Image (spheres, helix red, strand yellow):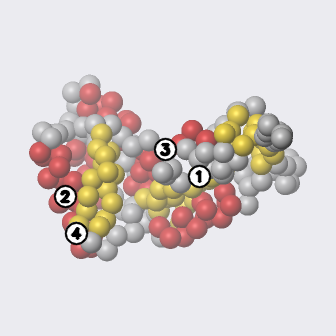
Amino acid sequence: MVELGHVLPAPLDPAAREAVEAHVTRVLDALGVEFGPTHTEIVLTDDGPRIIETHLRVGGDEIFNLAKDATGVDMIDFQARQAAGLKVLPDIRAVLESDREPRCEAIWYTAPEVTGTFMGLAETDPGRTDPAVTVLLPEGSELNGLAGSFTRIARARGTAPTAEEALDAARSTVGVLSFVFHVSPPSRDLV
């Protein structure tokens, strides 16, 4: 399974949000986590939230940047300040309670199942590069036909007032990208 996207804040109804917060709090309490950044991935099931994984760090895949842009909370800065012995919770609460325009952030990746050598992004409009797009693989990367986190070719960011609009913006931006591959025919034993 390959994660292809993230959106913050998550578009959850109040009951689901409360269930997630209560479940994650119970899990972190059971693990003895009392301070510092954490990253917990859950799935909502018919029986309530279930943990996929949890870590004592900020989320990867640009999640910390999505959170900063969506909420104003710079988790890397606050983590460094807390590690230096400073109290950060009052400052985090102040940022979250500030008068900010609601903003949602999304990121979407492309990971085509292709075999060949990645040659780069196809030029659809010479001289124009979309600042929302980041090409992740260096030219010359070999792909083996399997999709995985390290075969994601590019990502795009989206910003909007709602989670759905931000996600649509990121998906549509990455969805129109074209790539160039050098594909060799498979070697076959002939009879």
Amino acid at circle 2: His
Circle 3 crowding by C-alpha within 10 Å: few under 14, some 14–19, many from 20: some
Which of the two labelled residues, at mark 3 and mark 1, occupies the earlier sequence position?
3
**Numbered disc 3: secondary structure:** loop
Residues at badges 2 and 4 in contact (C-beta under 8 Å)?
no
Circle 2 crowding by C-alpha within 10 Å: few under 14, some 14–19, many from 20: some
Which of the two labelled residues, at mark 2 and mark 1, occupies the earlier sequence position?
2
Residues at badges 3 and 1 in contact (C-beta under 8 Å)?
yes
Residues at badges 2 and 3 in contact (C-beta under 8 Å)?
no
Q: Circle 3 sits on which residue?
A: 61
Amino acid at circle 3: Asp
Q: Circle 2 sits on which residue?
A: 23
Q: Circle 4 sits on which residue?
A: 47
Instruction: Give the Cα separation between the discs numbered 2 and 4.
Output: 12 Å
**Numbered disc 4: secondary structure:** loop
Q: Circle 1 sits on which residue?
A: 109
Circle 1 crowding by C-alpha within 10 Å: few under 14, some 14–19, many from 20: many
Q: Judge by depth and name the residue closer to the eye, 4 or 132.
A: 4
Residues at badges 3 and 4 in contact (C-beta under 8 Å)?
no
Judged from this view, the residue extending furthest toward the top is 84
